[in-house]
Amino acid sequence: MASTTSSAEALPVGKVRTIFAGLMLAMLLAALDQTIVATALPTIVSDLGGAEHLSWVVTAYMLASTATTVLWGKLGDLYGRKALFIACILIFLAGSVLAGTSQTMGQLIAWRALQGVGGGGLMVLSQAIIGDVVPPRERGRYQGLFGAVFGVSSVAGPLLGGFFVDNFDWRWVFYINVPVGILALIVVAAVLPHIEAGRKPHVDYAGIILLGGVSTVIVLVTSLGGTTWAWNSAPVYLMVAAAVAGIIAFIAVERRSPEPVLPLHLFSSRVFTVAAMIGFAVGFAMFGAITYLPLYLQTVKGSTPTESGLEMTPMMLGLLITSIGSGQLITRTGRYKIYPILGTAITSCGLYLLSLMGRDTSTLQAGLSMFVLGAGLGMVTQVLVIAVQNAVSYRDLGTATSGTTYFRTIGSSIGVAVFGTIFANRLAANLATAVPSQAQGACGPETLVASTQALDQCPANVQDWFLDAYADSLHTVFLWAVPVALIAFGLTWFLPEVELRTATRGGDVATAGQSAGSSFALPSSRTSLEELRMILWRRVGARDPLQVYRVIDSDYALTPEQCWMVTRVSLKGTRSVVLMAERSGATADRVREIAEQLAARELVRLDGDTVASTPAGDAVAEELRERERDRLRRYVAEWPGGDEPEVDQLVEQLTAQLLADPSDVVAGR
């Protein structure tokens, strides 16, 4: 029987590894289904028809996954993640079986969307569960392996798809999920502990509907604009207006919801905001480009589906090496910022190298280009999850993880749609130029675009004309991905680097104390409340008052003096410059200087010699107080009686005392 716990207790290493194996299997299922159908699409179209809806076989999965990602993360925070994870596996397996039995393209698209609902949960909950059982400092090695799963799936997906198409039937592309999913289900059900959410559930239904609706409309605009409808057409204008209205309504709903599906306070964290922007740009460029690699290999180079999967192996190797390597280095050093910087730079180079590929490109050159791309991607995606999970409180772990995944996934969905539009328009323009006289009937442009398999029966000059047009269109797609990756590179420089914690919920007292080089030890069962107060005071506030502010301010770029003033004014109310100078031991000029700096950022209001709080300053102060509360709770979480109301009151008192007490902070002593 699976265990139940109310805190992030330290699990045996063997059990963590078993849990991780189950999560890896589930993650592999979801990741494979983003790529496995690519090599099977031509055969599927030949069997089911509906070539005009071909892209929706991929888009439906990604859209459903995107729309439900944040929902699964929030529900995991509210209800616990184990039951939801099992439900996601079952939903995914049901979608897989139904997709394999599809008789029409419409049915296949619908069941792919059902798969996406389950797949979105598998992706985000597996990463959040690692946050439940592994402290941030140790997550690098695990998240690195998750990144390796994406690397394996990016190549194994097309390879398996080609293998099933060439040797069995395209329906096995979906049926293969069943045995793997059942194995993951057994492992997760048997060994994953149930961690209680610890707060009363309140589902933000309005936020869920609005977020899903906005995501859908955005992807529809980018998918249909410029192809089905002109960009300046009424339907596109209406969808853009609907998206804007939906975003405004979503923000209004989230401000009022007691448990918002995507809490707006997450965006006050610079780590989360920057990571979300990087994830969006990387997802846009990555999936927008990778989706078209099998097309290049099969159509332009003439590879079979199986061969194209094998030829993408260098990208998998590059991603495996850097993903696992960067994860190990993060665990050893506790530093992560350098990897997204290097990764996005290398990714940009890899995409540019892909844009140089043409009909005459050698297998070696293509392989090196894909290796560079994979090496870059391996240092980015999972590192962002580590950074975000480390920067937020435990109560927001699942929501923040799903938020990061959401922005990467919505970027991927939009990237696939936008690059699909670019490719279709460019190909149409190329095929309208210098059309050979023999390019008609079975060798006409429309026939060849619908099924490139007919190209072998066409005259040599028609083949050259079509393949040149196809290669040039793919060149344009890869080239357009480069500036998007460069935007991600620019954003990585703004990602704050916060010291990685060594506890899961901030609850491993002994480890936390040792990692800080302190002699602070876990209080014994005989420790009185007053003794605990003294231990906490010595541990977090007595040695260096400035350190309190350095530790908790990771996103706002405030000095310790500014942190002190924001929290003091918010807690104590309007204060005079002279009084604060007297209490802090600093000069009045120094206090005024700090107040002016904060007033320029609208974090306080300075009226003559009076300093008052502002809504923005109150929000920052509350976030700083919450971080200090979390820090104090870390040190008492495993103390017998640490969950008693008296201890909570002690934490609250010490938080106010540490942050609002002068403590010679402004005086610099």
Image (tube, rainbow, N blue to C red):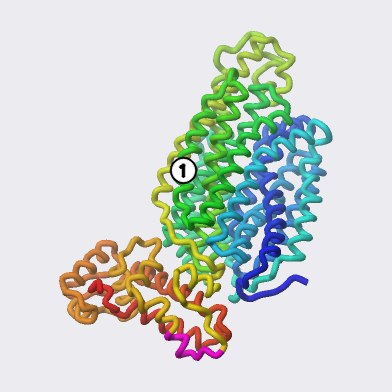
Q: Which residue is mark 1?
A: 342
Q: Which residue occupies the foreground of this view, 525 or 631?
A: 525
Would residue 405 be counted in the magenta stretch?
no
Q: Quadrant of the C terminus?
A: bottom left
Residue 331 appearing in the image = yes
Main SS of the magenta part reads helix
Q: Residues within 10 Å of mark 1 (few under 14, many from 20)?
A: some
- Indicate left or right for 612 with 352 as reference: left
Residue 206 appearing in the image = no
Residue 518 locus on image (x, y percent): 44, 73
Residue 380 locus on image (x, y percent): 52, 47
The image quarter in which residue 38 lies:
top right
Disc 1, SS: helix
Residue 582 locus on image (x, y percent): 19, 81
Q: Is residue 317 above or below residue 401?
A: above
Residue shown at 67% from the left, 38% from the top: 155
- Indicate left or right for 158 with 529 as reference: right
Q: Is residue 228 above or below residue 108?
A: above
**Kind of residue indicated by mark 1:** Leu
Residue shown at 51% from the left, 40% from the top: 234
How many callouts does the rendering have? 1
